[in-house]
Image (cartoon, rainbow, N blue to C red):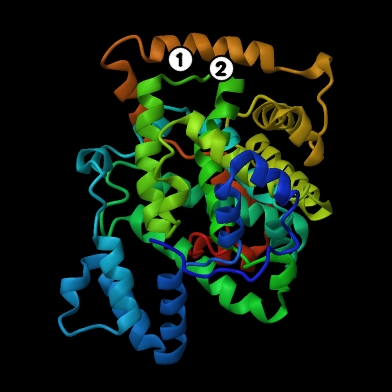
Amino acid sequence: MDAKHTPRKAPERVVDLDAARRRYGTRADHVVTLLTAGDPLADAVIAELDFYGPRARRALDAGLRRGLPSLGRQPSAAIGALLKHLETTPTWVDPLLLHKGDAVSLSVPPMWFGLCSITGALAHSYASPATARLLAATDRPADMAAALRLAEMGVWARQTIRPGGLLRGRPGYLATVELRLAHARMRATTLTDWDRGSWGLPIGQLDMARTWLGFTLIAFQALTAVGIDITDEEERSLYQYWSYVAHLLGLDERLYKDVVDHAGARRLQDLLDATTDTPDENSTALTAAMVDAQARAMAGAPGAVLSEEQLRHLIDSVLRRAFGEEWGDRLGIPHVPAATDLMPLIGQLNRQARYWQTYSSASAPEARRRALEESGPELRTAAHSCDASCRRTAGAVRPGAWAA
């Protein structure tokens, strides 16, 4: 889908635009345009839900679960348009791939998926000062907010990658659309107090693109750091699957349609970084709180053999390797003393395990089966960090309610 909102001038959050134009040409101006681009289909649905109330919500829920034809009479315009978009599968989508799920991510042991993919994606979102500014504006204590975001992201990601999870009416499909609508809701409720001239549109196209890159490029840079590599064929499969996730999320197709591997994702990330200001104090605070929440959850998981402090060092080390030294410093991720750095040993052990996991045609499916049966420690984070009322909220959370 194409976003139509064009700014009169670049928001103040854009940095070094002239340098970006010299390097990327018209693509840099396209990025600036998307800073004030939302998701017209989802934004219109939020307006209809507010206007028509529960009747519209019931129609939307029924359409998401059973499809547009099941509604019988013609739904309201915005809901009908969104459902039509969701149910019009792009020609490049392989139906068999959706039935198999994200086999590449499923081949990663749950602990490493949570530590690398989920924490990496969150940190990548926080690297944008505009996103961090929005997410830091909460009445909850920082540790509680970090725990809930970690848990919510873990639930959404695991539903999304499961076999058949993105088929119409399945949990991953429903959770992804709810995430899309949560972004639209946040745009609608934030705009009255949001300086669009300085920050662009809250949770706009580029903020969503950062989340998408977090689960593709950043996640697998982090996994490579711990010795979990993928083949070129797996890389292409990963991006094909996540391109459909981008479609369901309402991401502008021009951002991802040419991204078929890590090299293409790196070009997109470089373009975003070239026009994004340095992470601020909100970015560093959110990242630190997220690392603490993940370390606390992993240390409290059954069978944990590392202390919370050791796990914090491990996560910091993984993130610094995923983002590189420069961005690691910008995000305030501490350097890990060489004496306590477990990464060389972990990388060697994981490479050996990965070799045997993919040694035969039966071993990889077995690894995916175990991944489906196990849950990551981040799903227990809320219970470790919240009181009873907070746990009730976390248990009924609508995936994506925390933003990008």
Q: In front: 261, or 283?
A: 261
The Cα atoms of the two marked residues, 1 and 2, are separated by: 8 Å
Q: Secondary structure at mark 1?
A: helix
Q: What mark, if any, has residue 227 been given in the picture? A: 2
The N terminus lies in which quarter of the figure? bottom left
Residue occupying image coordinates x 27% and y 73%: 62
Q: How many marks?
A: 2
Q: Is residue 284 above or below residue 360?
A: below
Using the rendered image of the protein, determine whether residue 373 is visible from the camera's viewpoint: no
Residue occupying image coordinates x 45% and y 15%: 354
Q: In front: 329, or 373?
A: 329
* Residue 33 x, y percent position in the rendering: 57, 61
Specify the quadrant of the image occupied by residue 329. Answer: top right
Query: Dot 2 surroundings within 10 Å: few (below 14), some, or many (20 or more)?
Result: many
The C terminus lies in which quarter of the figure? bottom right
Residue type indicated by callout 2? Gly
CB contact under 8 Å: marks 1 and 2: yes
